Image (cartoon, rainbow, N blue to C red):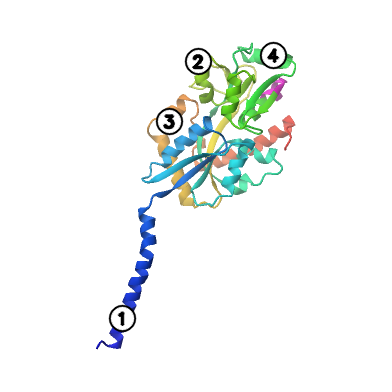
Amino acid sequence: MQAPSLRRRRLAASLAALAALATAPQALRAQDSPVRPVKLLLGAPPGGPTDFLARMLADALSARPGQGVVVDYKPGAAGTLAAEAVAQAAPDGFTLLVAGPSSTVAAPLFFRTLRYDPARDFTPVAMLGAGAFVLVVHPSLPARTVAEFLALARSREGGLRFGSSGIGSAGHLCAELIGQATGARLLHVPYKGEAQAANDLLGGQIDFMITAPNMALPHARAGRLRILAVTTRERTAALPEVPTLHEAGLPGFEYLGWLAVFAPTGTPRATVEAVQAAWARTLAEGPVPTRLGELGMRAPQRLESPAGLAAFLASEQARLARVVKETGLKAE
């Protein structure tokens, strides 16, 4: 007959084994099942510059073995629908926002009923791309220079119609700045995304756009569109023959287009740093840096660090507030 102390020891060991068996399946599932996919949410439809850079980021993140990445589209309301969804998502690193200024710095200036606060609800993670926009017109427009374009906009009844991805988008604000600086009459036609606006520009339903070079270049090379100028102070390597607006009669004019990735506030710092590191590796190797450079979308080095990105976003918020005040644009 076993001693009581020995029976107690064997009972304790049996209970411990049962407890281990009870928890083993959960631990094995965590180790053996595929990693939950990361969702990149875009406030734009497929086919535009946001989609282009989001897919580059998806490739960078999916380099981790077993890590899936889903690019999800939620266009509309100048990107604020997607931004709101990310602001309300769990801060676990599995939902990220790829966006430009319209939904992240300009939205509070244009939407009185905005249901998120970009400064409070988002953590800036990484700058994906930044560079010149282009002023691009339909070839039927009788303007081959910026001077001719502005003269036409001043003289034509109703002015010239331009499309953008929505109120407060970079293309919208840049065009408003041009109009303010020159007295040109420019009529804004907002769309749900760059691709829809570009389709109407190709069809001649609108007269011009301010858009990213990678959107305009293929059509310009095929003769379907005409690029008149770039919006940075220096000419871009992607279009060395195209003058800047600064050169073309708007002294000091500059407008930088950009797209970045954001996480919900509260996302673990280690997760944010992992995304930053994945994108930094992409910029340091392979064809991505060359491709971004060719398209004029490689961000200046000062914007590639987290601190540089945060400082830039703060300065953009202040700048856009001045644009809204000086142009008389109204919140909705």
Amino acid identity at mark 2: Ala
Residue under pointer 3: 289
Residue stretch rendered in magenta on the structure: 178-186
What residue sits 37% from the left and 46% below the top? 66
Label 2: which secondary element:
loop
Label 3: which secondary element:
helix
Instruction: Find out whether residue 185 is within the magenta segment.
Output: yes
- Name which quarter of the figure residue 16 lies in: bottom left
Residue under pointer 1: 9
Would residue 315 be visible to someone looking at this image? Answer: no
Q: Nearer the viewer, mark 4 or mark 2?
A: 2
Amino acid identity at mark 3: Pro
Chain-order first, disc 2 or disc 3? 2
Residue under pointer 4: 152
Q: Is residue 298 left or right of residue 110?
A: left
Chain-order first, disc 2 or disc 1? 1
Would residue 155 be visible to someone looking at this image? Answer: yes
Between the residue at mark 2 and the residue at mark 1, the CA separation in whole angstroms equals 83 Å
Residue under pointer 2: 222
What residue sits 39% from the left and 30% below the top? 287
Look at the image and tell me in which quarter the C terminus lies: top right
Label 4: which secondary element:
helix
